[in-house]
Structures are given as C-alpha cells and as structure tokens.
Amino acid sequence: MSKKIVITGGAGFIGSHVVRLFVNKYPNYQIFNLDCLTYAGNLENLKDIQKAPNYTFLKADINDAQQINKLFEQHAFDAVIHLAAESHVDRSITDPNAFIQTNVMGTANLLNAAKSLWKNDYTNKRFYHVSTDEVYGSLGETGFFLETTPYDPQSPYSASKAASDHLVRAYGNTYHMPFVITNCSNNYGQNQFPEKLIPLFIHNIKNNKSLPVYGDGKYTRDWLYVVDHARAIDTVFHSGKDGETYNIGGFNEWQNIELIHLLCTQMDQKLGRAAGTSAQLITYIKDRPGHDRRYAIDATKIKNELGWEPSVTFEEGLSLTIDWYLENESWLNNVTSGQYQSYYEQQYSK
Ligand code: NAD
Ligand code: DAU
C-alpha cells in the first residue's frame, strides 16, 4: 500500500538510519525527511539515497507551528515518525530551554498539525513517537525498565522527553489519535555526532587526546546498534498496536569503564598500536550533575509480541562502528569544526 510518511529529525544520527531503511525497503512509500539541520543534522548522512524517487527533504523547524501546519496541509501525510529532538544530556544541563522548546513545544506542534490534517478520520493514520529509556529515571544495581515502570526523569533532557511522551498519550486519549511510543536504550553506530561517548572516544583515541571519564566510570548503559533500532522502528510502525508502548534495548549492559577498555583494545588492534596504549589516555574527570547511575531495558514485550531482537553482538557492532569512523575521516572533520570546537572546550575545560 502506498503511504506518505514524514520522518522528523531524519538528518540526525538515528533518523538517517530510519530514513535509509524506509526509502530502500518501501519503494511505494513517499518518505519526507523533515529537519531544520541543527548542529546535529547533516544531509551528508543520506547522500546514498538523496536522489531516490521516493525521497524528499523538507527543511523545516518543528518549533515553527505555522510552517509545520502548512507542510502537513500541502503533503497530506498519512503517518508521522517523530525523532527530531535536542538529544544530548550534557547540553540540556547547560541550556535546558532549547530542550523544553524543541522536545515539548515542537512535539505539540506536530500533534496539532496531525490533528488538524486528519480531522478525526484516523483510518490508516499513525503518530509514532520515538522516545528514550531515560524517562524512567535511574536504576539501582538490579532490575530493569518495563513499559509499566513509572516515569521519573532526572535531567532536563529526560524531563522534556517525558513531557513529550505524556502529550502524545494525552492526544491519543483525548482526541483518539492513533499513536505508538517506543522507549529505547543507548544507541551507537555510524553517523553519531561525536559529543556522545562512543564516537567522542574513538575520535580522541585516534588523535591521542585524553578520554574524559565522568565520576567513577561505573555508570551503566544498555547499548544497541543503531541499525537494530531502525529495524525495531520499522517493526513497531508496521505491527505495533495503537496506543501501546514498546521498550527497545540491546540486552547488553556495560559499565562505562569496561566499555571504554573494550574500545581501547579494539582501537589498539585497528591502529596497529601496542596493547594498552589507548587505555593510557583514560582520565577521570568531574561527574555529570545528576548523573543517572544505571539504565537497563527489559525488551521482552517487543521480542515476544512483535518478534524483534537485536541482530548483531556488541563486539561486532562496535568493530563496524570503529571501522566506519576510521574510514570516514572527512565526515568527522566536517562535524568537528566550527561550533563543535567551542562546545568541546566549554564542556571539558572545567
Ligand atoms: P540527533 O541529535 O543525532 O539528531 C536530532 C535531529 O533532529 C537532527 O537532525 C536535528 O537537526 C533535528 N532537529 C533538532 N531540532 C529540530 C527542530 N526544531 N526542527 C526540526 N529538526 C530538528 O539525535 P539522535 O541521537 O538521532 O536521536 C533521535 C531521537 O531518538 C531523539 O528523539 C532522541 O530523544 C531519541 N533517542 C535517542 C537515543 C540515542 O542513544 N541517541 C536513544 C533513545 C532515543
Ligand atoms: O539512554 C538513551 C539515551 O542515551 C538517549 O536518550 C540520549 O539521547 C543519548 O544521548 C544517550 O544518553 P547518555 O547520557 O546515556 O549518553 P552519553 O553518550 O552522553 O553518555 C554515556 C555514558 O558515558 C554516560 O554515563 C555519561 C558517560 N560519559 C559521556 C561522555 C560524553 C563520560 O563518562 N564521558 C563523556 O565525555
């Protein structure tokens, strides 16, 4: 069946993998990538599909309600897959308002545009909201986040994502808008902006710069290869039930310091350095304020109900990721110039 799908944030890290998957897998769908190209959005991520006949880029800001309403009327989208957001926790600590604006108000603008376009006729319509496991707060040493875990966001980023999740559910409840929400754990892979742990450390190891580990390094995250997240979004978009939430995770918990040692070992091998060379760059620094101790997703529901599970092991995914960054030096150099330099100095010079 033919569909017009608008994917917001499609020029970003996860969004670009979702756009690529949908453009290539569903030639009968019209895929619209709606993105305003913040520092994190980069059309170079999609250069392999930019000329595909079923792909259109729309440069637009979800904070501009008028522009968004106009685009929805003009293109009459059947579905929204909403990824556009401010996504980096450290930035939310220094500039919370940008997160409240884009993640909360931007989501409200999209919901309003979809509501006025669809005018209560929701046949074959769907609003898919992509969210994070951080809305559930922080775990102790045991236990997992379930879809029923109460929300307890701890950073301005996670609070703004929690607010957007609540809005989506409220539009479902009040206006009967058909929606699905997924809450995913930490992603890694090709095209991730090097402010996030894994690409930042690959970049620093390559350039013999110190590896800034926050606090005691024993914070735990559950890592998922981005291509597997895109596959999960495809599965939930097509087979998930209206009004449901699905947790997505890698069944793959790592303490930061253990992950960093694995990364150093793989990097030493790939760069032909003596074992232990890169680990010497590890430097413990001041902790992130309000740092969540542990995230771990129980992804049983999506596995049992929809048959999705990760397709690559962490060691394989990490190796593919390192290879990509080493082979795509120009991508990294492009995104690490300009505004990124001042961000890096501000963030790590304290
Ligand atoms: P990203 O920062 O790499 O990309 C965000 C994209 O959104 C960029 O292309 C940016 O230009 C665009 N954008 C930002 N503000 C916009 C605006 N006002 N209007 C239009 N476009 C705008 O983010 P990401 O890591 O790919 O995350 C994508 C989504 O997935 C986010 O909603 C995030 O909360 C969620 N998520 C991320 C992770 C992760 O580990 N990265 C895990 C779970 C959920
Ligand atoms: O859990 C999903 C979330 O994962 C997403 O919703 C967010 O968009 C995404 O940014 C990510 O958030 P984290 O804060 O977990 O990711 P980050 O890569 O920033 O940090 C991972 C861990 O590494 C965290 O415990 C902080 C630590 N860290 C990070 C950086 C950038 C360091 O020790 N040093 C660093 O320089």
Image (spheres, rainbow, N blue to C red):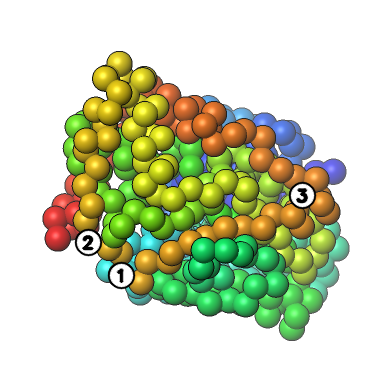
User: Distance between the Cα atoms at labels 2 and 3?
Assistant: 38 Å
Type of amino acid at the residue the image marks with label 3:
Lys
The residue under label 1 is 289
**Viewer-proximal residue, 214 or 229?**
214
- Determine whether, in the image, residue 263 is placed left or right of residue 135: left
Q: Are marks 1 and 3 in contact (CB under 8 Å)?
A: no
Quadrant of the frame with the C terminus: bottom left
Looking at the rendered structure, the secondary structure element under dot 3 is helix
> How far across and how far down the image is residue 264, in percent?
34, 32
The residue under label 3 is 303
The local crowd at label 2, few if under 14, some if 14 to 19, many if 20 or more residues have their Cα within 10 Å, is few
Sequence-wise, the earlier of marks 1 and 3 is 1
Quadrant of the frame with the N terminus: top right
- Determine whether, in the image, residue 276 is placed left or right of residue 328: left
Type of amino acid at the residue the image marks with label 1:
Pro
Type of amino acid at the residue the image marks with label 2:
Lys
**Relative to residue 184, is residue 100 depicted above or below?**
below
User: Which residue in the rendered view is the most extreme toward the left?
Assistant: 349
The residue under label 2 is 286
